[in-house]
Amino acid sequence: MGILLQLFYNKSSLLLAQLVLTEPTVLTAEYRGLYGIATPIDSLPPGNLTLVVLQDECCYWMVDKNGYVFWVVEKLDKLYRFPNVPKYSEEEGHKFARSHLEKVLLSDTAQIKFGDLWEKTTFSALLAVEEGFLEQWSAGRIVCIGDSIHKVCGP
């Protein structure tokens, strides 16, 4: 079963790469985002969703029943085009997070700083937010529709 899943994954990856590579220059990155998961903070109950929007940056975070998922997104210094979209190391992600530790996250039940969330983070990744408008939305047996073809929300 493992081999079949791996073959399916490899075939799917090739088809998706084919789809994107048909028009590589349309993929751009103008923002980067730090995405992460943290353990709960006692003063914030499950079900809380917060969005803080500032000029050229924003911070989203939500509390589910097991913890938090968060995003901190900021505008890059310029527009990057594929394949020159920046890639970030784990240390660069941590440096980015440290630069936002004093940022206040507001809630209807408490006021905390991003640093309070960061110190309870169990996983994070700093990634370029790639965007693009493709003419073709299918490759082989893969068709992209709905949330797979557009960003949910942006800064």
Image (spheres, helix red, strand yellow):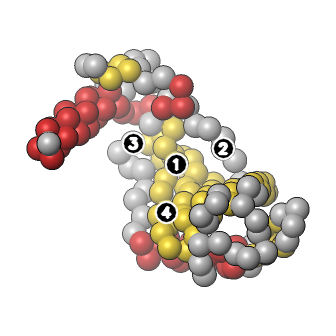
Could you tell me if residue 59 is visible in this image?
no
Q: Which residue is mark 2?
A: 154
Q: Which disc number belongs to residue 126?
A: 4
Q: Residues within 10 Å of mark 1 (few under 14, many from 20)?
A: many
**Is label 4 in contact with label 3 (beta carbons under 8 Å)?**
no
Look at mark 3 in the image and give the residue it sits on.
Answer: 82
Locate residue 48: give its quadrant.
bottom right
Give the alpha-carbon distance from disc 4 to disc 3, as whole Å.
17 Å
Q: Amino acid at mark 1?
A: Val
Q: Residues within 10 Å of mark 3 (few under 14, many from 20)?
A: some
Discs 2, 1 touching: Cβ within 8 Å:
yes
Crowding at dot 4, Cα within 10 Å, few <14 / some 14-19 / many 20+, comes out as many
Q: Which mark is residue 129?
A: 1
Looking at the rendered structure, the secondary structure element under dot 2 is loop
**Extreme residue in the left direction:** 3
Discs 4/3, front? 4
Classify residue 16 by image quadrant: top left
Mark earlier in primary sequence (2, 3): 3
Q: Which residue type does callout 4 highlight? A: Leu
Mark 4 and mark 2 lie on one chain; the one further toward the N terminus is: 4
Residue displayed at 47% across by 64% down: 125
Image quadrant containing the N terminus? top left
Q: Earlier in the sequence, mark 4 or mark 3?
A: 3
How many residues crowd around disc 2 within 10 Å: few (fewer than 14), some, or many (20 or more)?
few
The mark that comes first in sequence, 1 or 3, is 3
What residue lies at 73% left-to-right and 55% top-to-bottom? 47
Asked which secondary structure carries label 4, the reply is strand
Q: CA distance from mark 2 to mark 1?
A: 9 Å
Q: Is residue 150 visible?
A: yes
**Cα separation between marks 2 and 3:** 19 Å
In this view, 125 is above or below 9: below
Q: Is 37 above or below relative to 32?
A: below
